[in-house]
Image: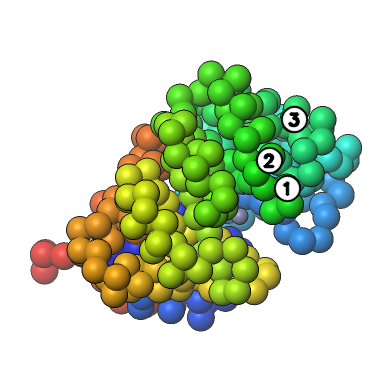
Amino acid sequence: MRIFDPHVHMTSRTTDDYEAMAAAGVRAVVEPSFWLGQPRTSPGSFADYFDALIGWEPFRAGQFGIRHFATIALNPKEANDPRCREVLELVPRYLDKDAVVAVGEIGYDAMTPQEDHAFAAQLALAVEFDLPALVHTPHRDKVRGTQRSLDVVKESGIDPGRVVIDHLNEVTVELVRDTGCWLGFSIYPDTKMSPPRMVELLRRYGTERMLVNSAADWGRSDPLLTLRTGEAMVAAGFGEDEVDRVLWRNPAAFYGQSGRLDLSDADAPADFAGNSIKRGGA
Ligand SMILES: [Zn+2]
């Protein structure tokens, strides 16, 4: 099973996680920029974080044969802190970088006017830089937050086929289904979506435009839940091709719209010593 995790915060994970992910078949990841738990107090610490997402973290991932890409944005939560407002001026500099495959995570946390502003401004950047957009939906008041996110996406004029609405569940899936946007689902050990619930949604709504991620971060989470979802799909009777579509081809197609997703040789096995072993050749 080859796996592309389209949303995982590797900054918070250890090399043991990378090793386990590589062994599980994870060959590519997208790491969205987000809050770090501890609030940041100046734009400078965002610049250092963004640099790490396109520099140090791809290097760490590469040691396990995993391709690492990033999405860059001022996240909705910190958009409320006046000390972080200048980050919006920093973001465009990063949207030009080869390892950046989307604008994100953008969207809503508490649905404040400051969040409205940052969300709309960064959707405009996605249009300007011709990049897809990753939209985080809030954990509280999810239905209203999802609906309002879809309204803002529509107003922005961005092609909905270049937008993923993430952290969906049984309650919000119907809101997004017919909008043309991609549908993202974060699978967690004990909250939000689980592998069996995800399989049920795939059975009901099909595999088209469906993205499954582990969203693993600093909280209780598990970067192997992509694999567990694939296993649950197989156990439920899905064919190999459908599993490959959800866990590899869908994320590759979505982020491929950036024109920057180089996955050549990404499914060659890793040697765990820093290089992916090229197939064929001497
Ligand atoms: Zn996230």
Residue 268 left/right relative to 160: left
How far apart are the alpha carbons under marks 1 and 3? 16 Å
Residue 10 left/right relative to 21: right
Look at 56% across and 68% down and name the residue there.
Answer: 188
* Mark 3 or mark 2, whichever is nearer to me: 2
Look at 45% across and 54% down and name the residue there.
Answer: 6
Tell me the colour scheme of the image: rainbow
How far apart are the alpha carbons under marks 3 and 2? 11 Å
Which residue was labeled with disc 3? 116
Query: Which quadrant of the view contains residue 260?
Result: top left
Asked if marks 1 and 3 touch (Cβ < 8 Å), the reply is: no
Give coordinates of residue 35: x percent, y percent.
72, 53
Give coordinates of residue 105: x percent, y percent.
61, 44
Q: Within 8 Å of ligand 1, the CB of disc 2? A: no
Give coordinates of residue 223: x percent, y percent.
50, 70
Which residue was labeled with disc 1? 141
How many circles with numbers are drawn on the protein? 3
For the residue labelled by badge 2, is the local secondary structure a helix, a strand or a loop?
Answer: helix
Residue 145 is marked as 2
Residue 248 left/right relative to 41: left
Q: Amino acid at mark 3?
A: Asp
Query: Quarter containing ligand 1?
Result: bottom right
For the residue labelled by badge 1, is the local secondary structure a helix, a strand or a loop?
Answer: loop
**In-front residue for pair 58/119:** 119
Q: Amino acid at mark 2?
A: Gly
